[in-house]
Amino acid sequence: MKTKIERAGMADARKIYEIIRRHASSGVVLPRPLSVIYEHIREFFICRIDGKIAGIAALHIVWEDIAEVRSLVVEETFRKQGMGKALVKKCIAEAKKLDIPKVFALTREPDFFIRLGFEKISRKKLPQKVWNDCINCPLFPDCDEVPVIFYLK
């Protein structure tokens, strides 16, 4: 089994959309229209196993000093193999290349991120701009996600 993490390309957009749509229905990630996937394709990393997409994650730049790991999904048959960890580390490495000192995530699995060096923080410590996507969430305004942050410096 050959595993490879790489940047997504335009040819991957529909598969990314399908993965997000399928997992959004169970509340794992926020839904994203296909047009948004195309507009933000440069944010996505994909993990391919034997040429097929088995996991995805995106690094969304929020402001000059902060970015978000979002749309992190590993297909069920490939979980518990380190793929999610590898995708998050790839996002952190990208933030480092871009000289972005803070990377956060909103998650229902804070322990996963804490094992990767993130720490829990108060929602109030995140810029207001972060909450723009919340309006599209079916749980708004009763969010059950935990904010976590990774400091690169």
Image: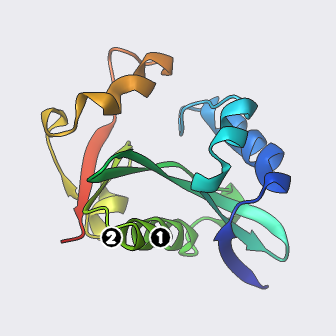
Element type at mark 2: loop
Question: Contact, CB < 8 Å: mark 1 with mark 2?
Answer: yes
Quarter of the figure with residue 74: bottom right
Instruction: Identify the residue at image location x=25%, y=55%.
Output: 149
Element type at mark 1: helix
Give the side of residue 136 with respect to residue 50, left or right: left
Q: Which amino acid is tagged 2?
A: Leu
As drawn, 141 above or below 95: above
Instruction: Identify the residue position indicated by label 1 in the image.
Output: 85
As drawn, 81 above or below 88: below
Q: Is residue 131 visible?
A: yes
Please rate how many residues cluster around mark 2, counting C-alpha atoms within 10 Å: few if below 14, some from 14 to 19, many from 20: few
Quarter of the figure with residue 147: top left
Q: Is residue 144 visible?
A: no
Q: Position of residue 118 (x, y in %)?
A: 25, 62
Q: Position of residue 1 (x, y in %)?
A: 79, 85
Gap between marks 1 and 2 measured at Cα: 7 Å
| Of 62 and 118, the residue lying toward us | 62
Q: Position of residue 91 (x, y in %)?
A: 46, 65
Instruction: Identify the residue at image location x=84%, y=77%.
Output: 50
Instruction: Identify the residue at image location x=34%, y=60%.
Output: 113
The mark found on residue 26 in the picture is none
Instruction: Identify the residue position indicated by label 2 in the image.
Output: 116
